[in-house]
Image (spheres, rainbow, N blue to C red):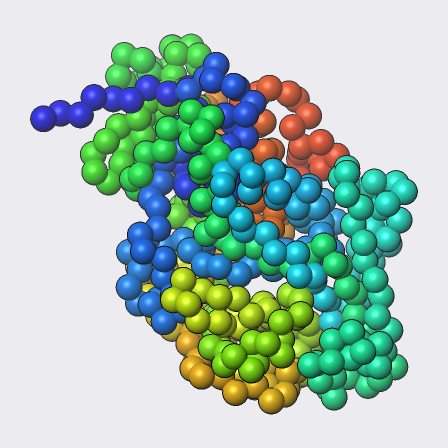
Amino acid sequence: MEQSVLRVDIAVVGAGLLGSAAARHLTCMHGGRKSIALVGPIEGSPRTPHQNSERSVFCCHMDEGRVTRALDPDVVWSKLAARSMERYKKVEHDGDHEFYHPVGFLALGRRSGEYIQKMEASLASTQLEKHQQQQQLQQHTPVVVRRLDGTDAIQREFPFLSLAHISGDDALALFEPGGGWVSARGQVKAQQEAAKKARCTHIVDLVMNITEITEDGKNSGQAENKSISSRSALITTATGRQILASKVLLATASQTNFRELLPSDKKLDLELLTQTIVFLELNEHDAKRLAKMPSIICEGTDGDKFDAYILPPIRYPDGKCYLKLGHGEQFEKQLHSQTQLERWYRSHGDSEAVAWLQRYIHRLIPGLSPLSVHSDACVTTHTPTNQLYIDMISSHIGVLVGDNGYSAKSADEIGRMGAAMISETTGDWAGDIPAHTLRAKYAPPRTAAL
């Protein structure tokens, strides 16, 4: 039996962190006056750290711990995070899911190192330390950052840390008490539930194709004399369902260039980079010893470029407590196809990265006795500007992609901006962030072989 076509005013394609946030904001902005659909698969049974080979849906939000912080080397990402963090509690309340854990965030490194110097420069330019008086980031709650100078000051606050790899006078930490971690899957659930309450339709399916057409059913290339206002986008899913939308917002991350989602003459300039994650299963003694541990990003023991992030003990759906570790740029590799992407997601990551991360955590937190060690694979989507793409790429298709690895903490504000842009409710949807810095860049067309 042939399925009928669902007609909506705005469809958000991609039901991850950014798409779910955009759907919630769209329902709030339009208050039922426009029909909103969120289209994308959901997670089945929550995966645990040893189930990476069982994936059938490939995305980054099917996990628990993600670092959240307003403190960032980049001023724009600092603003996006701070504004999102201010609304965490409202999203939790409206979506009936808790996901924010304000255990604190620690930026740790050398005073002379590149990482800490970038953090200090960002602090100076945004005046985060004076935010309580100036409210530079447009928040109601001030962002507080404390400096911990030298190894003695750092270890008084966090005695479980070993800083033998940093000379005492050169050690510097910046501590943000309001930082911590968010559950990525919990945040997605909260955003989706809040959107559903506000009458957003969630179509649980994978989008395979988007075609620009006119109301008479012709594709846009066959109807050049038609007015732009008569055109729509026809969305086709993996199960054959069709949705006709006046506007479409793509929040499709690594899938954006690999499926038939963009106009045929456009391909975004995106780089997909591999990430390897290590999970240490903690015994009860170590879990209690690290109960007051913040989320940490720090320079490595092998030089400025060898940095890492560490999440505090988090209890996963299997009931076990894990430390989650990840690396910086040093182990990233580029992926070029859907096949490579799926193969990577089903792998255990880079064995060299796994070994380095294990060495690193035992140097930074001596005495750990993990019950087991698991590794996993993830992918981040990067732009050449290190900023998002929030842009209209045709008369009725917009993009909300290029998180550069920062989407979990900043998702709500990114979703708000994308929702405002696609709705055309205001010309200043980017606020104090210059909209031209968020414009999409396109990959050069491939030249035919001679």
- Inspect this view and state whether residue 354 appears: no
Q: Residue furthest left?
A: 1
Describe residue 202's horizontal placement relative to residue 144 as left or right: left
**As drawn, 173 above or below 447:** below
Q: Position of residue 115 (x, y in %)?
A: 74, 67
- For image coordinates 35% across by 46% down, the residue present is 42
- For image coordinates 32% across by 56% down, the residue present is 45
- For image coordinates 66% across by 61% down, the residue present is 103
Q: Position of residue 441 (x, y in %)?
A: 55, 42
Q: Quadrant of residue 433?
A: top right
Describe residue 194's horizontal placement relative to residue 45 as left or right: right
Q: Quadrant of the N terminus?
A: top left
Q: Position of residue 210 (x, y in %)?
A: 33, 32
- For image coordinates 47% across by 26% down, the residue present is 198
Describe residue 149's horizontal placement relative to residue 22 as left or right: right
Q: Quadrant of residue 378?
A: bottom left
**As drawn, 409 above or below 242:** below
**As drawn, 62 above or below 431:** below
